[in-house]
Amino acid sequence: MEYTFRLATTDDAPAIWEILQGAIARRKADGSRQWQDGYPNPDVVKADIDKQIGYVLIVNGTVAGYCAVLINDEPAYDDIDGKWLTDDDFVVYHRVAISEQFLGVGLAQKMLGYIEGYALQNNIKSLKVDTNFDNPGMLKILDKLGYTYCGEVYFRGSARKAFEKIV
């Protein structure tokens, strides 16, 4: 398979929203509360693209995954109930989602590998991420990739597990 990880464009928005809708439905079917409150939505995707923080994973010419990637830009992380491993610059990513047709082949891990590469290209050694306590798939991936649980952060009134990895 041929992979590309690149900035999302407005042309990618319909495919991104389709991927996110699938992920929202899967979270609901799994009994999760994550992404069940109208977030994310097409306006969030448009804002990500406009701010040039939305990224797509392309597999053989098809948009197969999506995430938002930012540097030092997550105010909720300032108020962690716990302790980060570092206080250095960091890359944070949100809205990780893989297309239904590409599930189960390790693309989320591949995308996180590209995010690690992005961090290193920007001379940043810290990756931070959060997820719901009821997202076993993402929790398993973070454990497998060597992330350390650092505590809880709060978004839209709910606690989320916060993790950091030094690369």
Image: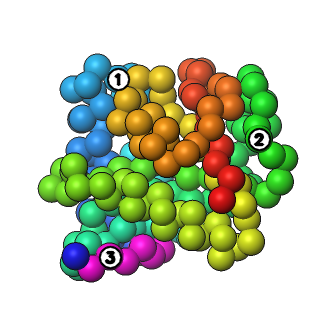
Q: Which quadrant holds residue 151?
A: top right
**Residue 79 in the image: above or below residue 65:** above
Query: Percent x, y for residue 59?
Result: 26, 72
Taking the magenta stretch, the answer to whether it contains residue 3 is yes
Mark 2 and mark 3 lie on one chain; the one further toward the N terminus is 3
Query: Taking the image as drawn, is residue 92 in sight?
Result: yes
- Which residue is identified by label 3? 3
Crowd class of label 3 (few under 14; some 14 to 19; many from 20; radius 10 Å):
some
Given the image, on which type of amino acid does mark 2 rest? Leu
Residue lying farthest left?
101
- Which residue is identified by label 1? 32
Q: Which mark is residue 135?
A: none
Q: Quadrant of the C terminus?
A: bottom right
> Can you tell which of label 2 and label 3 is closer to the viewer?
2
- The residue positioned 59% from the left and 70% from the top of the image is 118
Mark 3 and mark 1 lie on one chain; the one further toward the N terminus is 3
Q: Nearer the viewer, residue 147 or 20?
A: 147
Mark 1 and mark 2 lie on one chain; the one further toward the N terminus is 1
- The residue positioned 45% from the left and 43% from the top of the image is 144
User: Is 71 situated left or right of 44 in this image?
Assistant: right
Query: Percent x, y for residue 110?
Result: 39, 62
**Residue 47 in the image: above or below residue 95:** below
Q: CA distance from mark 3 to mark 1?
A: 30 Å
- Which residue is identified by label 2? 85
Q: Which quadrant holds residue 46?
A: bottom left
Q: Secondary structure at mark 2?
A: loop
User: Is 48 situated left or right of 64 in this image?
Assistant: right
Q: Secondary structure at mark 1?
A: loop
Q: CA distance from mark 2 to mark 3?
A: 31 Å
Range drawn in magenta = 2-9
Given the image, on which type of amino acid does mark 1 rest? Ser
